[in-house]
Amino acid sequence: MIKIFATEKVKEIDKYTIQNLPIEPIALVEEAVTAFVNEFKSQYSKARRVIVFAGQGNNGADALGIARQLLYESYKVETYLFNPTDSLSPECAENKRQLLSIENAKFTEIRGGSNFAPPILTSRDVVIDGLFGSGLNRPLEGGFVGLVKYINASPAEVVAVDIPSGLFGEDNRENDPTCIIQAKQTYTFNFPKLSFFMPENEKYVGEWKILPLNMHPQAIADTPASYFLLTEEDITGVFVPRKRFTHKGTYGHALLVAGSRGKMGAAQLAAKACLRSGAGLLTVHVPKCGEEILQIALPEAMVEADTHDDVFTQAPDVTGYAAVGIGPGLGQQIETAVALDELLASIAEPVVLDADALNLIAANPDLLEKVPERSILTPHPKEFDRLAGASFSAYERLQRARQYAKEHSVCVVLKDAYTAICTMEGNVYVNVGGNPGMATAGSGDVLTGIILGLLAQGYDPETAAVVGVFLHATAGDIAAKHWSEWGMISGDIVDCLGSAFKQVI
């Protein structure tokens, strides 16, 4: 599992690495330069002009080293070093010296008080942004504001070194969004920045990729983190092998309370996903209008009909069920809220709550007190805002979700392009899989079914949430390969769950 560190923690790891490997700072810079250039060469043709903008710190040192190595690779490079205080970091000064040792290197240094005539940037140009690194903690000022705006207004493609200049590593609520480089690609080193996962920062970060460097493993292991990036290796070892002498009862009997007139598709999608995720048995409690629909659409599931024709009004007996999921397509009628109250009062073990179950809790806050500890809540951003109050940025919402999980002793699965699983211990697990094709009706219902199926099999709630999110995204990526991001529907995600299991187990 990859830790997502705050920027000051990364500096401490760098310092420990330099002191204990041992390795000279300039050698660490050179390793970053080589990793960046190798990736750059695989993406960009030598026919394009490369404009390097470097600052006076170590991000600038990286940029100057990149310019040098690209010149060695026969790229057409022009380099601009911005040194307004006439004070370069030792590594930046050394890489400036090495760059100037190359005959005919096109190099311009802009010192304090000197005029700067920017190069005319065209669509054929690639700008490498190495002005400021992740240590920035206040908005850009002075001439750098004009330079950033000039670059952003140009048709050139921008590649950022480690982080786009002007972007903070974590919280950007106090930043000036007009003074941040808008990169198409960001090549970051070793660890992603938390700000990369926020939708409001997508236009600055673009597509990003982690480039591994030689960091001291003990420093990484000993440095605590609250945020983690999920990888396939983290998921593979979680699954319990199935033994030959087992039966359907071995893998749990799940109860799904879902559906209302006109929304039985949500119940069917969640139910099928639950069974596809390995649950041995499933009973779906639906209004009378949905009984025949479910029996025909999903013969593998048992159906329990509510006394009401159209909506959920009768809390079922939960005795004997290994796990309960509530919410997809449920509706928000008063009778349904009353039945949800009765149902939650009868359950002692963690449940999965989604969609209208969450909306009913938001409208009737007293219901939250009856939600069992370690239950899994799966809101999308608007549903979460109804539960916890409006947030004005994704970063603020994530902090609220983390706090909400701790305060109410639940697991919050905050669904988004990068879904974040917030545990009651305060940890956050970020999933980067999935694709825009999953932004389709019913996708969330499928996730509810997957998590319910895993919970019924005996996986603890946090594991069920993390693994469920990863399987959901993996199946979505497989579906997109078959049907495209434009043509896929949520039922395709369910149909690809088997392939997702094959991939990760």
Image (spheres, rainbow, N blue to C red):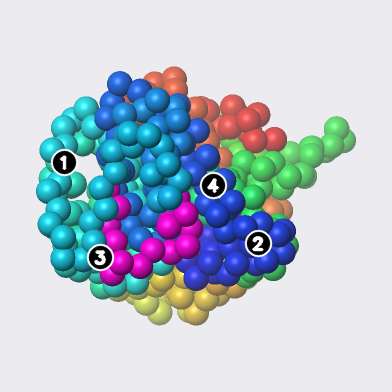
Give me the C-alpha separation between circle 2 and circle 4.
Answer: 15 Å
Instruction: Say if 130 sits above or below 503 in the image.
Output: below
- In terms of secondary structure, where does tag 4 sit? helix
- In terms of secondary structure, where does tag 1 sit? loop
Would you say the residues marked 4 and 3 are in contact, meaning their CB atoms lie under 8 Å apart?
no
Provide residue 371's location: percent of width, then percent of height.
51, 71
Instruction: Say if 493 sits above or below 472 in the image.
Output: above
Would you say the residues marked 1 and 4 are in contact, meaning their CB atoms lie under 8 Å apart?
no
Circle 2 residue:
17
First in sequence: mark 1 vs mark 4: 4
Q: Is residue 16 magenta?
A: no
Left or right: residue 215 compared with residue 360: right
Residue type at the position of mark 4: Glu
Left or right: residue 378 compared with residue 56: right
Give me the C-alpha separation between circle 2 and circle 1.
Answer: 38 Å
Estimate how packed mark 3 is, as few (under 14), some (14 to 19) or many (20 or more) residues with alpha carbons within 10 Å.
some
